[in-house]
Amino acid sequence: MIVFEDVSLVYPNGVHALSNISLNVARGEFLFLVGSTGQGKSSVLKCIYREACPTSGDVVVDDWRLSTLPHGKVPFLRRKVGVVFQDFKLLRGKTVWENVAYALQVTGATSRDVARRVPRALELVGIAHKSKMFPHELSGGEQQRTAIARSLVNNPLIMLCDEPTGNLDPETSSEIMALLARINSKGTTVVVATHNQASVDRMRRRVVRLVHGRIAHDEERGRYHVGLG
Ligand SMILES: Nc1ncnc2c1ncn2[C@@H]1O[C@H](COP(=O)(O)OP(=O)(O)O)[C@@H](O)[C@H]1O
Ligand SMILES: [Mg+2]
């Protein structure tokens, strides 16, 4: 589903963010990316949704070779790949319902489609009862549920989460991780960059540790401190 072929990424300022990353994430897999700040976790995710382009090597997403993907196809890639961030990135002037609906409307969905799919996404993440609220009226966990609904509403094949619990308390964090696991169990491939040791250790999924832009460790059913001895 996601293949990194010897990917290196050097930013324009000369920082070597990723060096010779080779990685294969199977359809339906759940993978944690761990590593301290600055080791390249976000850069790996950016290469998957083509926010960044490798300096060498290539990334293949669901049979789309990204180095040769025409620019005009990037919006279609973004429908295959939902992204969730630490700071939620909700539109402040729109309600929960409108935030989720907007993600569908920009793809040209009919109003009938919107009316059918938005409630389904809101229910799946457990936020349907707050659909008329604005982001500032919600707790952090509720805002993240809304952001997850927004990325789910287009039925993505892959969900990328960049420190999705970074702004949440421990209990809310484990609820959000449980929600991501539930989404994964329905078939979506999920990649989560995280510092949330408790969840990684509890969930025992595949763990990839990045150190200085390289894969230092890759373990099935790993723990947060995998590779650190
Ligand atoms: N847009 C950018 N331009 C230049 N350097 C960047 C950019 N984004 C990240 N970096 C650098 O690349 C390295 C990896 O960063 P990042 O992928 O954000 O790591 P992480 O998500 O693990 O904290 C760091 O040294 C960071 O400073
Ligand atoms: Mg990061």
Image: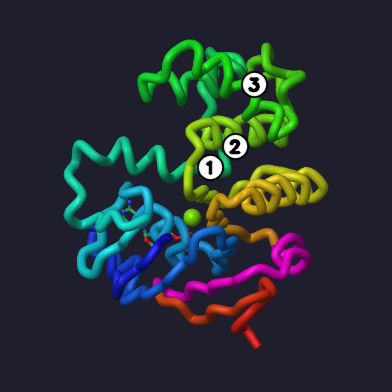
For numbered disc 2, what is the local secondary structure?
A: helix
Q: From this view, report whether residue 52 is shown above or below residue 228.
A: above
Residue 31 position by quadrant: bottom right
Let me know if residue 203 is in the magenta part: yes
What residue does disc 2 label?
148
Residue 193 image point, x, y percent: 55, 58
**Disc 3: CA contacts within 10 A as few (<14), some (14-19) or many (>=20):** some
Q: Is residue 46 left or right of residue 111?
A: left
The quarter of the rendered structure image containing the C terminus is: bottom right
Could you tell me which residue is drawn at 58 percent across and 19 percent down?
A: 116
Q: Identity of the amino acid at label 2? A: Ile
Residue 218 image point, x, y percent: 54, 78
Q: Which mark is residue 36?
A: none
Residue 223 position by quadrant: bottom right
Report if residue 119 is visible in the image: yes
Q: Identity of the amino acid at label 1? A: Val
Could you tell me which residue is drawn at 35 percent across and 56 percent down?
A: 61
State how far apart marks 1 and 2 are (Cα). Answer: 6 Å
Q: Which mark is residue 84?
A: 1
Q: Which residues are magenta?
A: 197-213
What residue does disc 3 label?
119
Q: Camera-side residue: 136 or 20?
A: 20
Report if residue 165 is visible in the image: no
State how far apart marks 1 and 3 are (Cα). Answer: 19 Å
Q: Identity of the amino acid at label 3? A: Pro
Q: Quadrant of ligand 1?
A: bottom left
* Disc 1 and disc 3 in contact, CB within 8 angstroms: no
Could you tell me which residue is drawn at 59 percent across and 64 percent down?
A: 32
Let me know if residue 26 is in the magenta part: no
Could you tell me which residue is drawn at 32 percent across and 47 percent down?
A: 51
* Disc 1 and disc 2 in contact, CB within 8 angstroms: yes
